[in-house]
Structure formats: structure tokens, C-alpha cells
Image (spheres, helix red, strand yellow):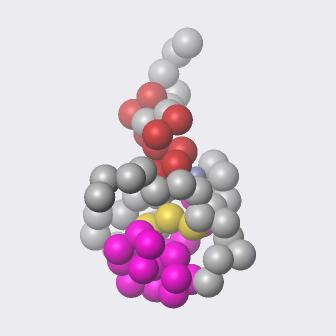
Amino acid sequence: MDRVLGRIDPTVDRTAAARLLGCSPDQVGYCPRCQGLTRRYGRQAQVICPACQAVQPPSAVGAPS
Ligand SMILES: [Zn+2]
């Protein structure tokens, strides 16, 4: 299933979020854009959460509009 992961509310249990993200709990951290939970640390870290990346990829940040 390739369903895009939505924003994970920061009140969600870190262990449950890690399971959703497919990483370990100590890799979970806050997205700087929406404060939702994302795979913030470690290998293959996604500082910007999947929900925010779907709206605007990180490569687009800082680009003149
Ligand atoms: Zn986000």
C-alpha cells in the first residue's frame, strides 16, 4: 500500500508514530513546519514530514517565487 502518510499529531504516542513511520522511536521528532511527528533523526531522516513534503518538497524551500 502506497497511501501517503498524513500528518501525525504530536500527541500521538512516539512508539505508535514510529510504527507508522517505519522507524524506531528514538528517530521520531517534530516537523519544523507543522509540528507533527516525523522521522527526524538517523539514516534516511525526513526532517520535513511526509504530509508537508506532499504540499511542498524541501527542494522548493527558498526558491524565489
Ligand atoms: Zn510537517
Name the residue at the top extreme: 65
Q: Is residue 38 above or below residue 63?
A: below
> Any magenta on residue 50?
no
Q: Position of residue 21 (x, y in %)?
A: 41, 70
Residue at screen point 55% across, 12% down: 65
Nearer to us in this view, 5 or 60: 5
> Any magenta on residue 15?
yes
Q: Position of residue 64 (x, y in %)?
A: 52, 15
Q: Position of residue 60 (x, y in %)?
A: 45, 28
Nearer to us in this view, 8 or 30: 8
Segment tinted magenta in the rendering: 14-31
Q: Is residue 45 above or below residue 48?
A: below
Nearer to us in this view, 33 or 2: 2
Residue at screen point 44% across, 72% down: 20
- Quarter of the view holding residue 41: bottom left
Residue at screen point 64% across, 77% down: 12
Most common secondary structure along the magenta stretch = helix
Q: Position of residue 36 (x, y in %)?
A: 63, 61
Nearer to us in this view, 50 or 30: 50
Q: How many marks?
A: 0
Q: Is residue 60 visible?
A: yes
Name the residue at the right extreme: 11
- Quarter of the view holding residue 9: bottom right
Residue at screen point 42% across, 79% down: 19
